[in-house]
Image (spheres, helix red, strand yellow):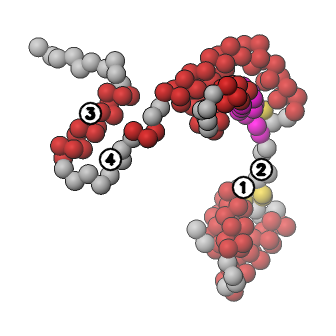
Amino acid sequence: MSIAKIVEQALQDGYLTPAMEAEVGHICDNASELSIEEYMALDRLMGALLTGEVVAVPRKQFINVMEELVLTEAIARVAEIEATSERTIDVGDIAAYTLNRLPPLYATTEEGANYQRQRAKAELQELIVQQVNEAISRNLGNRHDQRTPVVGKTTGNELLRQMSSLLQVYAPNFEEKSST
């Protein structure tokens, strides 16, 4: 989106959102030189912000306390495994897998974050540990070197064979029920 369109949208809505502000900043940072129209649009936006015609929506800073709790647990477990074996484990993979299976715990203040931490440790610590262990177990069970890309195969039969193999790996307990 261009600066002129962003300014037009802000004037129409009466608000400059953080996303709009970031886009204007991105355009300005990456342009070697702005056009006269872009400078005029920025001048118009500044005037509208100064008069209150457009209000800048403040960025709300928030954190997901669950992320720090999961990372702490994942780092500790991965460090244990890597210290006692030759395996290396990507902490990011473990954290992402785990976070996708746990509720988020957002907070906007340090007081709120402390509350969420205490709540999670009391109510969810066992589930966090269980999900991190499941993520590690799945990660150690993966055989990345045995994967073959689907792209590049030209025959329909080869594609079907690969899809069948994938389904057998990722859904081993699925059984198609016949309707007879």
Quarter of the image that includes the N terminus: bottom right
Q: Estimate the spatial distance between the alpha carbons at disc 4 and disc 3, rounded to whole Å.
A: 12 Å
Could you tell me which residue is drawn at 30 percent across and 55 percent down?
A: 152
Q: Earlier in the sequence, mark 4 or mark 3?
A: 4
Is mark 2 in CB contact (under 8 Å) with mark 1? yes
Q: Position of residue 157 (x, y in %)?
A: 17, 43
Q: Main secondary structure of the magenta part?
A: helix
Disc marking residue 29: none
Q: What stretch is highlighted in magenta?
A: 62-75
Residue named by callout 2 = 59
Q: Decide which of 102, 165 is in the foreground and name it.
A: 165
Q: How crowded is mark 4: few (under 14 residues within 10 Å), some or many (20 or more)?
A: few
Q: Residues within 10 Å of mark 1 (few under 14, many from 20)?
A: some
Residue named by callout 4 = 150
Labels 3, 2: front one: 3
Q: Earlier in the sequence, mark 4 or mark 2?
A: 2
Q: Estimate the spatial distance between the alpha carbons at disc 1 and disc 4, rounded to whole Å.
A: 40 Å
- Report if residue 107 is visible in the image: yes
Is 68 within the magenta?
yes
Residue named by callout 1 = 18
Is 106 within the magenta?
no
Residue named by callout 3 = 164
Q: Which of marks 3 and 2 is nearer the N terminus?
A: 2
